[in-house]
Amino acid sequence: LKDIQFIRSMYYNKLEFIRFDSNVGKFVGYTELGVKNAERLNKDTSLIAAMKAQRETYCLNNVGVD
């Protein structure tokens, strides 16, 4: 169960510009817009904690379904 990760990606015009990865524990930007948004979102500690909790809430509860 340690190798399960939660990833939330955001796209604009079919291009991924920002991603949250539970293994990294923060948002990572892939474009100029994504980098700026990642910096802003990573300052919000409550959002980071909520996104990290999504791994346990969503992934670990559904591991036996697939």
Image: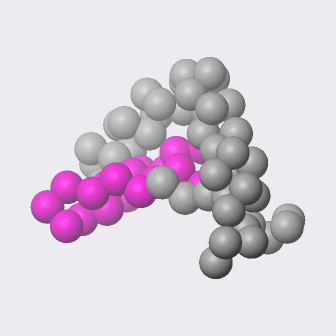
At x 55%, y 58%, the residue is: 7
Q: Is residue 43 visible?
A: yes
Residue situated in front as seen by the camera: 65 or 18 = 65
Quarter of the figure that contains the C terminus: bottom right
Q: Residue 44, how many percent across, how many down?
A: 55, 22
The residue positioned farthest toward the front in the image shown: 65
Q: Main secondary structure of the magenta part?
A: strand
Is residue 9 rendered to the left or right of residue 16?
Answer: right
Q: Residue 6, how many percent across, how many down?
A: 62, 57
The residue positioned farthest toward the right in the image shown: 2
Q: Residue 49, how many percent across, how many down?
A: 68, 31
Q: Is residue 15 above or below residue 34?
A: below
The quadrant in which residue 65 appears is bottom right
Q: Is residue 11 above or below residue 26?
A: below
The residue positioned farthest toward the bottom in the image shown: 66
Residue situated in front as seen by the camera: 23 or 52 = 52
The colour scheme is: one colour
Q: Is residue 66 magenta?
A: no
At x 74%, y 72%, the residue is: 64
Q: Is residue 7 above or below residue 57?
A: below
Q: Is residue 34 above or below residue 40?
A: below
The quadrant in which residue 53 appears is top right
The quadrant in which residue 14 appears is bottom left
The residue segment tinted magenta is 9-30
Is residue 54 rendered to the left or right of residue 9?
Answer: right
Quarter of the figure that contains the N terminus: bottom right
At x 48%, y 54%, the residue is: 8
Q: Is residue 11 magenta?
A: yes
